[in-house]
């Protein structure tokens, strides 16, 4: 079994067992919170007291560089969680989380999460897998940013996305994604125009096809 198979997390399964609306004794006192596009969910320096689950929408996670520019480490969508480093002893947030579209969030305290994890071993293992996956993806991104040019970073991003979440369709691979060209540019350290140019070149070469929701890779092993 390869690492992608070992660490791949079905986020919707996590939603079913984590959100307080799914936990009978918590549902009556819990509400969803809607954050408007651009309204920070938390910023560096905030106290780590909660974990957050995306019900609908999309958020970007990152930190600010020395020149106050945004350095994006991840873009998360429906069913994914963030703020989990509070479980690992993070007392104060070091990153920011900002919705890139209007986003509905399920919020749970770390104390309640620890209680759920103690009572639910499946949840505990899934949280462990999530943290491991995040570390692997951050290491991979750092490697690409340091050693690869823009085209290679975009191509390797497509390959990694296919490994994590792709589905085989004969000899082809389909990636179901809501990421925009701007999202991909933030994740690969390139400009939106560069991402669009590279994707169009790959499409013209019949290496990929794409629309707003899917990217189809014709021959994954030979994509370059």
Image (tube, rainbow, N blue to C red):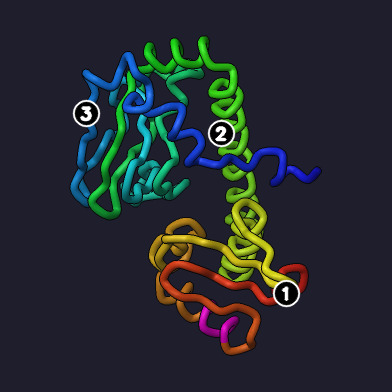
Q: Of helix, strand and loop, which one carries label 3? A: loop
Residue drawn at x 32%, y 27% is 21
Q: Position of residue 133 (x, y in %)?
A: 60, 38
Residue carrying label 2: 130
Q: Of helix, strand and loop, which one carries label 2? A: helix
Distance between the Cα atoms at labels 2 and 3?
24 Å
Of circles 3 and 1, which is in front? 3
Residue carrying label 1: 219
Asked if the stretch drawn in magenta spans residue 201, the answer is yes
Residue drawn at x 68%, y 76% is 218
Q: Position of residue 24 (x, y in %)?
A: 34, 18
Q: Position of residue 139 (x, y in %)?
A: 62, 43
**SS assignment for the magenta stretch, majority:** helix
Q: Position of residue 190 (x, y in %)?
A: 47, 65
Q: Is residue 44 left or right of residue 72?
A: left
Asked if the stretch drawn in magenta spans residue 99, the answer is no
Residue farthest to the bottom, as pictured = 204
Q: Is residue 148 visible?
A: no
Residue drawn at x 42%, y 17% is 113
Is 3 located above or below residue 91 in the figure?
A: below
* Marker disc for residue 31: 3
* Marker disc for residue 49: none
Magenta segment, which residues?
Answer: 198-203
User: Sequence-wise, which precedes: disc 3 or disc 1?
Assistant: 3
Is 156 located above or below residue 14 in the figure?
A: below
């Amino acid at each position: 079994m390869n690492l992608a198979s070992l660490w791949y997390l079905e986020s919707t399964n996590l939603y079913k067992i984590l959100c307080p609306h799914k936990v009978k004794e918590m549902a009556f006192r819990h509400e969803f919170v809607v954050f408007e596009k651009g309204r920070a969910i938390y910023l560096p320096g905030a106290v780590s007291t909660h974990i957050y689950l995306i019900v609908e929408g999309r958020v970007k996670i990152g930190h600010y560089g020395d020149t106050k520019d945004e350095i994006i480490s991840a873009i998360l969508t429906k069913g994914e969680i963030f703020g989990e480093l509070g479980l690992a002893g993070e007392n104060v947030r070091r990153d920011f989380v900002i919705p890139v579209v209007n986003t509905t969030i399920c919020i749970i305290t770390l104390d309640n999460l620890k209680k759920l994890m103690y009572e639910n071993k499946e949840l505990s293992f899934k949280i462990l897998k999530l943290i491991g996956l995040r570390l692997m993806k951050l290491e991979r991104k750092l490697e690409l940013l340091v050693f690869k040019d823009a085209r290679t970073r975009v191509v390797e991003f497509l390959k990694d996305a296919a490994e994590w979440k792709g589905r085989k369709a004969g000899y082809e691979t389909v990636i179901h994604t809501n990421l925009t060209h701007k999202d991909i540019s933030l994740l690969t350290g390139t400009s939106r125009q560069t991402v669009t140019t590279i994707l169009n070149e790959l499409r013209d070469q019949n290496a990929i096809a794409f629309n707003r929701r899917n990217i189809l890779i014709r021959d994954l092993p030979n994509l370059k």
